[in-house]
Image (spheres, helix red, strand yellow):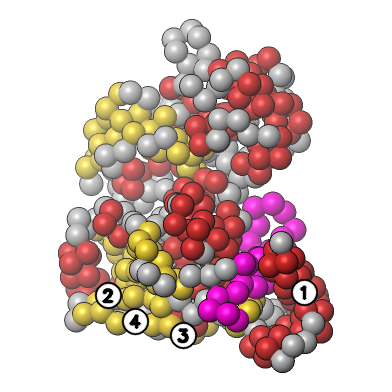
């Protein structure tokens, strides 16, 4: 079935099998391997991308459900060589260890700051409840999101 | 994990969706937000031959004021319930319960109609519908009917919905103070047990999550409260008529203990907010 989606500003047209999940379409068909397949059961959030601006778990959506939508993956955040404020804050605050959860953490954080530009630490922790870090590096992740908010990361 | 192959249908209108459901019969499943159906299809616990994706029926996503109730479109997302000002004003407990479903990504996709039709007794939002005696508006090829929320689910993942029917609207009566106590082992988990207490039309209503095959109205607790019993004494009645299962998250006895404790906490929280 025909699928037309806009990903990171570029429009794509493909014929997809209905059972194709969005994460597999992004990774295997479009070559955007930033979003990861982690738990594959909508628990870990490593596959988080923005669908029309809101965070979603791309392992729990059919690619066809995104037909006509605008998707942003972690590859689409930076402005050329200039990292997005949330990416810059993750780097400055050492908010990653192995890095597997990072694309999902970053996208969930971008979605949070769009909805709540000035969260407190509790709100950040609650908003990231759908993203698991197996290195358990949560403290620095929360610091990074607060830092990004202080720097106006929502804009 | 990839689902078994299926036929995919994406109607543009409700009439088209109902016609498709009528045609496909019990071969088809309705796909709304997909946050229950898709995981089940990936795990191959569900393998429908056809999926009717109702995601394009944008006209079923709304919250309207009905004078003494809110009329909520079936495709209203949990995130909408968290952020809608009418919900916050008229049924504040619906907002706080919606905030406890899954995680933000799940709430961006999951829908009220979807969670009610899925009929998982561990689902949070059905507690609001059941406690408040909400009315479920169901559309089919031959017209519409209204089902009291307490009569929708008949067992684990089973409802009175016919294959050619779908939920289109939920009428939720206005409510005053309310509190939902959800006990989980990890942040984003389903409730091991949940207890909701809410005042509406003068009376305190209590519903229990994951204490049986469906969401259960704690009528013994409500009766005790109506006789003037204290919250602590009334909460002891929370296990009457329940049939919880034992699983990895807790034994049946543990769930009964939780039901009493969480009901007392929910009742006390409502009392506290009414004293303010």
Q: Which residue is mark 3?
A: B151
With B84 as the anchor, is B51 left or right in this view? left
Q: What chain letter is assigned to the residue under label 1?
A: B
Label located before the other in sequence (1 or 3): 3
Question: Which numbered disc, 2 or 1, marks the residue closer to the eye?
Answer: 1
Q: Specify the label residue B139 is tagged with.
A: 2
How far is disc 2 from disc 1 in space, using C-alphas?
38 Å
Q: Are marks 2 and 3 in contact (CB under 8 Å)?
A: no
The residue at 27%/75% (across/down) is B139
Q: Which residues are magenta?
A: B177-203
Foreground tag (1 vs 3) = 1
SS type, badge 1: helix
In the image, B223 versus B29, the foreground residue is B223
Asked which secondary structure carries label 2, the reply is strand
Callouts 3 and 4 on one subunit: yes
Q: Residue furthest front?
A: B276
Residue plotted at (56% across, 20% down): A152
Residue B54 pos. (x, y %) = 30, 59
Name the disc covering residue B146, or none.
Answer: 4
Protein chain holding label 2? B
* Label ID, residue B234: none
Residues B47 and B119: in front is B119
Compared across the picture, whether B141 is left or right of B30 comes to: left
**Residue B264 marker:** 1
Q: Is residue B75 visible?
A: no
């Amino acid at each position: 079935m025909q699928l037309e989606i806009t990903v990171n500003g570029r429009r794509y047209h493909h014929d997809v099998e209905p059972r194709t999940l969005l994460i597999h379409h992004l990774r295997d068909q479009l070559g955007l391997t930033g979003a990861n397949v982690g738990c594959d059961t909508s628990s870990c959030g490593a596959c988080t991308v923005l669908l029309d601006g809101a965070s979603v778990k791309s392992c729990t959506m059919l690619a066809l459900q995104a037909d006509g939508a605008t998707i942003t993956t972690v590859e689409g955040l930076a402005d050329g060589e200039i990292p997005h404020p949330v990416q810059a804050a993750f780097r400055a605050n050492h908010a990653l260890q192995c890095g597997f959860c990072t694309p999902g953490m970053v996208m969930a954080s971008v979605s949070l700051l769009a909805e709540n530009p000035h969260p407190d630490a509790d709100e950040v922790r609650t908003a990231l409840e759908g993203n698991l870090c197996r290195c358990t590096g949560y403290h620095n992740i929360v610091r990074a999101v607060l830092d990004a908010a202080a720097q106006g990361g929502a804009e | 994990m990839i689902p078994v192959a299926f036929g995919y249908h994406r109607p543009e209108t409700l009439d088209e969706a109902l016609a498709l459901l009528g045609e496909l019969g019990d071969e088809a499943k309705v796909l709304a937000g997909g946050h229950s159906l898709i995981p089940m299809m990936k795990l191959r616990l569900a393998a429908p031959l056809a999926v009717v994706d109702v995601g394009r029926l944008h006209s079923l996503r709304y919250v309207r004021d009905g004078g003494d109730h809110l009329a909520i479109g079936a495709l209203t997302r949990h995130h909408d319930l968290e952020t809608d000002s009418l919900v916050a004003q008229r049924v504040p407990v619906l907002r706080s319960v919606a905030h406890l479903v899954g995680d933000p990504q799940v709430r961006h996709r999951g829908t009220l109609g979807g969670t009610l039709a899925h009929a998982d007794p561990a689902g949070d939002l059905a507690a609001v519908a059941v406690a408040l005696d909400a009315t479920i508006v169901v559309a089919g090829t031959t017209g519409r009917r209204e089902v009291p929320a307490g009569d929708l689910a008949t067992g684990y993942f089973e409802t009175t919905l016919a294959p050619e029917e779908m939920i289109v609207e939920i009428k939720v009566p206005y409510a005053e103070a309310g509190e939902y106590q959800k006990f989980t082992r990890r942040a984003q988990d389903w409730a091991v047990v949940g207890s909701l207490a809410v005042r509406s039309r003068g009376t305190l209503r209590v519903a229990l999550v994951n204490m049986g095959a469906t969401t259960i109205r704690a009528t013994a607790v409500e009766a005790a409260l109506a006789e003037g019993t204290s919250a602590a004494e009334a909460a002891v009645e929370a296990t009457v008529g329940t049939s919880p299962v034992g699983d990895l998250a807790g034994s049946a006895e543990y769930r009964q203990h939780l039901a009493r404790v969480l009901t007392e906490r929910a009742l006390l929280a409502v009392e506290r907010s009414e004293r303010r």
